[in-house]
Image (cartoon, rainbow, N blue to C red):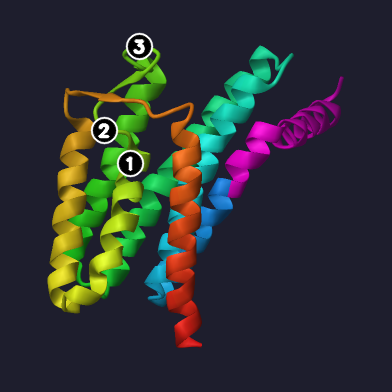
Amino acid sequence: MNDSQYQQSHQTKMLTFARDLPNICSLAGLFCALLGIYYAILGNFPAAVIGMIWAVFFDWGDGIIARRMQGRTDDYRAFGGQLDSLIDIVSFGICPAVLLLSYGKFSPWFLPGAFVIVATAAIRLSYFNVFGLVDDSTYMGLALDNNVIILAFVFLFEGFFSHAVFSVIIYTMFMVFSAFNLAPVRTPKFAGRWFYVLMVYTLGLTAFYGSILWSRV
């Protein structure tokens, strides 16, 4: 096989992996994170939060689909794990960092916080890729997706504070999150029935923030 045929073969394999159902779910989560980044830059924070919480939903969903699929090969599982990890750093590292920067009106004072968010995500995901779970139902440190779940709830109260005060609140909150993300403490992995709780939570927040967006039209 010459170099051209070899490259074409591997390009085909990449596209084949991308058509895998759990990976499609992962990519849907990436699209939601991209929407979160896009709307955060525009300053449309209700829409950004909707994108971010749906990114969590698809992040949970891809694992459930992968575990229930029969006959999935080791190659597909390995590829899916890498894809999921790379998407997580966008969804739970870059996207929250951009939201913080945008909410802070891209002030240089918010750059250190944005760096801490992205660096925390990179360190935590690297650690997880090497060491995995403590056991089947326990993480070391707070999982990154929990940051977004809590953030989406806290943003419900944005209207009770001035922009300046709320920017300090979310800045502080993200720094506390980062400390817990990297802390040597054990936290539960939410799975099973918790996915349905997340589904209701996601739909509820989507309806609430969607109503805010509708009122602005």
Q: In the image, is residue 144 part of the stretch drawn in magenta?
A: no
Location of mark 1 (residue)? 146
Which residue is at the far bottom?
217
Dot label at residue 142: 2
The amino acid type, in three-letter code, at marker 2 is: Leu
From which residue to which does the magenta span run? 1-28
Residue 58 visible? The answer is yes
Q: Give the left or right position of residue 158, taking residue 172 as reference.
A: right
The amino acid type, in three-letter code, at marker 3 is: Asp
C-alpha span from label 1 to label 3: 19 Å
Pointer 3 local density, CA inside 10 Å: few below 14, some 14–19, many at least 20 = few
The amino acid type, in three-letter code, at marker 1 is: Asn
Label 3 secondary element: loop
Location of mark 3 (residue)? 135
Q: Are marks 2 and 1 in contact (CB under 8 Å)?
A: yes
Pointer 1 local density, CA inside 10 Å: few below 14, some 14–19, many at least 20 = some
Looking at marks 3 and 2 on the same chain, the residue that comes earlier in the sequence is marked by 3
Secondary structure predominantly adopted by residues drawn in magenta: helix
Quarter residue 31 falls in: bottom right
Q: Give the left or right position of residue 130, taking residue 169 as reference.
A: right
Towards the viewer: 198 or 41: 198
Q: Which residue occupies 15% across, 62% down?
A: 169
Looking at marks 1 and 3 on the same chain, the residue that comes earlier in the sequence is marked by 3
Q: Which residue occupies 19% across, 74% down?
A: 160
Q: Are marks 1 and 3 in contact (CB under 8 Å)?
A: no
Q: Which residue occupies 19% across, 63% down?
A: 110
